[in-house]
Image (cartoon, rainbow, N blue to C red):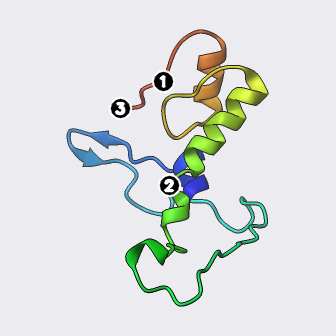
Amino acid sequence: MGLGYALSEEVIFSDGKPLNDSFLDYRIPTMEDVPEIIPIIVERKNARIPEDIRGIGEPPTIPTAAAVANAVYDAVGVRARTLPMTPERVFWELSGGGPVNKEL
């Protein structure tokens, strides 16, 4: 989920209506697109208060886009400040054109 948010998932609107409202047009990553993910679950014995409980579903997806943005910056030296960080957007950042806005 986090990699899709960072690299490919984007709803494109025109006149308030989504243009890519099907799985044919809205690109989500498949198993072929993502690397192997090895989860490490950190638990506390006898968790009794909310601070002892850890999220293991969607909460770990939150920092993924920031981590990918930092990796892009480390690799090419420009900050991609618009999500998703498509090759086209990174290209425009490299050429000094700034972020690409795909709204019609």
Q: Amino acid at mark 1?
A: Val
| Percent of width and height locating residue 41 | 66, 76
Secondary element at tag 3: loop
Q: Which residue is situated farthest in the top direction here? A: 96
Left/right placement of residue 11 relative to residue 60 reads left
Whole-number angstrom distance, CA of label 2 to CA of label 1: 23 Å
Quadrant assignment for the N terminus: bottom right
Pointer 3: what residue?
103
Pointer 1: what residue?
100
Q: Amino acid at mark 2?
A: Ile
Secondary element at tag 1: loop
Quadrant assignment for the C terminus: top left
When the figure is inspected, residue 65 is found, relative to residue 62, above or below; the finding is above
The answer to whether residue 48 is seen in the rendering is yes
Front residue of 65 and 99: 65
Measuring 43% from the left and 71% from the top, which residue is drawn there? 51
Marks 2/1 in contact by CB < 8 Å: the verdict is: no
Measuring 49% from the left and 38% from the top, which residue is drawn there? 83
Front residue of 90 and 53: 53
| Percent of width and height locating residue 68 | 65, 42
Whole-number angstrom distance, CA of label 3 to CA of label 2: 24 Å
Marks 3/2 in contact by CB < 8 Å: the verdict is: no
Measuring 60% from the left and 36% from the top, which residue is drawn there? 86
